[in-house]
Image (spheres, grey):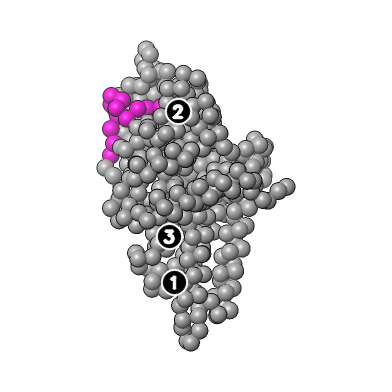
């Protein structure tokens, strides 16, 4: 059991931190205000290997581990939490193709996905099936050498902007066993998009419904085999949950650091805020909870890497705890800034808006508790 980062991990942590500081943080407020999707910045991140973090090297991936990814996403999130979260979603989509697709599909799509020349989105949620993902209704009916898709996906990050959509569709009976996974290109006939959603946060990534109306997709775009889609979706979410937890921690750590600096400069009642013991204790609790969440995330990532039997439960624990801690820490940091924290001149209010959704997506934190409880009671 070694809690120290390796020399390689420190190197790409520092590289991610520098990229976040120089290429993301200076522009994050502008992206947020103008709802800008920073495609060129995404491609610059991909030049550093962040477009296919745990994709195999033969198609241009970095072949890093889930633990490595948690370290990277924590640093990227300090620069722009919304943009870092989108990079996570792109990576989740890339990994599902790399892990489950046949060789022809891997070679066709992954080289351009890893450079982010082609941007990928993940399509599971529907208007009528959120937490109950196995109840999805989007159908894919075989017609010769194509599938014909009908249905709608909701809350899709990158909807209308991404080039590729890794979609969970129903090819068979009700329940998880009838779900398959297929890659749909943006220009596929019968594919359209809803209006861009107006959101509390995550303004630097577009969100829209993805609509299939007799959408024809080649059979060769099937990822894995028919009926394997739900397994693929859940496997992808194990990693996605770790990444989104790391994005919460990045925002939390940045907010904590800003609060400590502010408290050392701000004076009230004749002394710095940092000299008030009650506020010192608040900082101590925030730092402790962030560190505990980080350790839980790193352990969960190591278990997912190792294929441990309880990896899914551990990932759910880490996601639930890290996203709750992340939101609470950002909220506390905003409070410690007083009225300044509520201004857009400071990043806390943006961090707060961006991390709030982390408690909802990649499986709500209520569903995380359900996963944990079922594992404990073996239901």
Horizontal side of residue 257 vs 157, given as left or right: right
Q: Is the residue under label 2 in contact with that under label 3 (CB below 8 Å)?
A: no
Name the quarter where the C terminus is drawn: top right
> Most extreme residue toward the right, as rendered?
1
Give the residue number, with chain letter if any, for mark 3.
352
Give the residue number, with chain letter if any, for mark 2.
110
Residue toward you, 157 or 134: 157
Instruction: Place residue 190 in its image quadrant.
Output: top left
Q: Compare marks 3 and 2 and give the one earlier in the sequence.
A: 2
Distance Cα–Cα, label 3 vs label 1: 13 Å
Residue 336: x and y in percent read 47, 72
Q: Residue at x 29, y 27 (%)?
A: 187
Name the secondary structure under disc 1.
loop
Task: Count neighbours of disc 1 (C-alpha within 10 A) and say few if under 14, some if 14 to 19, many if 20 or more.
Answer: many
Horizontal side of residue 112 vs 7, given as left or right: left
Residue toward you, 368 or 67: 67
Residue 115 painted magenta: no
Q: Which residues are magenta?
A: 182-194
- Asked if one can make out residue 129 in the rendered structure from this viewpoint, the answer is no
**Mark number displayed over residue 337:** 1
Badge nearest the viewer, 3 or 1 = 1
Residue 377: x and y in percent read 67, 44
Residue 375: x and y in percent read 64, 43
Horizontal side of residue 181 vs 376, given as left or right: left
Q: Is the residue under label 1 in contact with that under label 3 (CB below 8 Å)?
A: no
Name the secondary structure under disc 2.
helix
């Amino acid at each position: 059991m070694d809690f120290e980062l390796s020399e390689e991990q420190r190197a790409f942590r520092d590289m991610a931190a520098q990229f976040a500081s120089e290429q993301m943080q200076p522009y994050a407020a502008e992206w947020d205000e103008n709802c800008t999707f920073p495609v060129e910045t995404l491609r610059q991140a991909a030049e550093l290997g962040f477009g296919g973090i745990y994709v195999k090297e033969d198609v241009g991936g970095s072949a890093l581990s889930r633990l490595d990814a948690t370290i990277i996403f924590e640093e990227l999130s300090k620069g722009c939490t919304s943009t870092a979260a989108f990079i996570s979603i792109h990576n989740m989509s890339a990994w599902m193709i790399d892990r489950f697709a046949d060789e022809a599909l891997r070679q066709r799509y992954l080289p351009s996905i890893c450079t982010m020349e082609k941007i990928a989105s993940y399509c599971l949620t529907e208007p009528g099936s959120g937490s109950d993902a196995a109840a999805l209704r989007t159908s894919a009916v075989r017609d010769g050498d194509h599938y014909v898709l009908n249905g709608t996906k909701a809350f899709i990050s990158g909807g209308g902007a991404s080039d590729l959509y890794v979609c969970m569709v129903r090819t068979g009976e009700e329940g998880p066993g009838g779900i398959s996974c297929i890659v749909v290109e943006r220009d596929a006939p019968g594919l359209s998009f809803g209006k861009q959603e107006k959101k509390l946060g995550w303004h630097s990534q577009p969100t829209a419904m993805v609509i299939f109306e007799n959408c024809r997709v080649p059979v060769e775009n099937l990822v894995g085999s028919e009926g394997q889609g739900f397994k693929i979706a859940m496997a992808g979410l194990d990693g996605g949950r770790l990444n989104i937890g790391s994005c919460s921690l990045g925002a939390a750590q940045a907010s904590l650091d800003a609060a400590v600096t502010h408290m050392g400069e701000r004076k009230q009642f004749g002394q710095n805020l940092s000299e008030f013991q009650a506020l010192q204790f608040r900082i101590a609790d925030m730092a402790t909870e962030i560190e505990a969440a980080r350790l839980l995330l790193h352990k969960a990532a190591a278990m997912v890497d190792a294929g441990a039997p309880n990896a899914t439960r551990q990932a759910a624990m880490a996601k639930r705890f890290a996203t709750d801690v992340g939101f609470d820490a950002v909220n506390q940091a905003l409070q410690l800034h007083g009225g300044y924290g509520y201004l857009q001149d400071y990043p806390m209010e943006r961090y707060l808006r961006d991390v709030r959704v982390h408690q909802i997506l990649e499986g709500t934190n209520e569903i995380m508790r359900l996963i944990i409880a079922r594992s404990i009671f073996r239901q």
